[in-house]
Image (cartoon, rainbow, N blue to C red):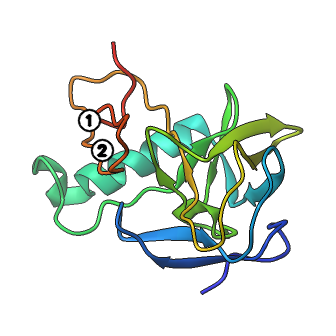
């Protein structure tokens, strides 16, 4: 499966990842400091984003009393600014499958209501694209599986 070429500056494919389920991989060499792909999806308020996160983690209705609902807990919500987020699960370009790494090869730039991923360094053909999710400190940290020598152990930033 390919990332939507309308939003990617280089050929990218979605494939099985060692980090988490699926990931995005380069099909060509990508030079350093170049725009790689735009993160697209449904623009929603941060309140709507919070409701969607709660629905995935805790379920709805009678299941709400359970601590966590069974099944996949994949969220593809990226914060755009103080008021809005983009839900990549609705009309996403494929960039929503880019995984976290504590030593990423991409960085994020937000401008004019859009989110773009740029290469930090040259990326080889076949290499997985990664970003640092930069989740805030938490009492319930999320375990990181990036495999980097500089891995923090969690996706969350330290307190």
Does residue 55 appear to the left or right of 108 in the view shown? Answer: left
* Circle on res. 144: 2
Q: Would you call the spot at circle 2 few (<14 residues within 10 Å), some (14-19), or many (20 or more)?
A: some
Instruction: Assess disc 1: are there few (<14), some (14-19) or many (≥20) residues with their C-alpha within 10 Å of its C-alpha.
Output: some
- Element type at mark 1: loop
Image mark for residue 129: none
Q: Observer-nearest residue: 28 or 71? A: 28
The residue furthest top is: 159
Q: Is residue 137 above or below residue 126?
A: above
Where is mark 1, residue-wise?
A: 153
- Mark 2 or mark 1: name the one nearer the start of the chain: 2
Q: Quadrant of residue 83?
A: top right
Residue 144: x and y, percent?
30, 44
Assign the C terminus to one quadrant of the image. Answer: top left
Q: How far across and how far down the image is residue 18, in percent?
A: 34, 67
Q: Residue at image x 45%, y 45%?
A: 101
The answer to whether marks 2 and 1 mark residues whose Cβ atoms lie closer than 8 Å is yes
Residue 20 placement, left or right of 13: left
Residue at horizontal 64 percent and vertical 62 percent from the top: 95
Question: 84 or 109, which is in the foreground?
Answer: 109
């Amino acid at each position: 499966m390919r990332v939507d070429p309308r939003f990617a500056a280089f050929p990218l494919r979605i494939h099985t990842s060692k980090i988490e389920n699926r990931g995005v991989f380069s099909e060509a060499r990508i030079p350093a400091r170049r725009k790689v792909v735009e993160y697209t999806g449904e623009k929603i308020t941060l309140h709507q984003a919070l409701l969607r996160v709660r629905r995935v983690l805790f379920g709805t209705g009678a299941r709400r009393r359970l601590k966590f609902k069974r099944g996949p807990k994949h969220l593809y919500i990226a914060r755009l600014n103080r008021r809005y987020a983009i839900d990549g699960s609705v009309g996403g370009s494929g960039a929503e499958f880019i995984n976290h790494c504590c030593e990423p090869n991409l960085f994020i730039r937000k401008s004019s209501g859009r989110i773009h991923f740029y290469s930090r360094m040259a990326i080889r053909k076949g290499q997985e694209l990664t970003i640092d999710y930069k989740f805030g400190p938490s009492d319930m940290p999320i375990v990181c599986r990036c495999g980097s020598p500089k891995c923090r152990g969690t996706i969350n930033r330290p307190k």
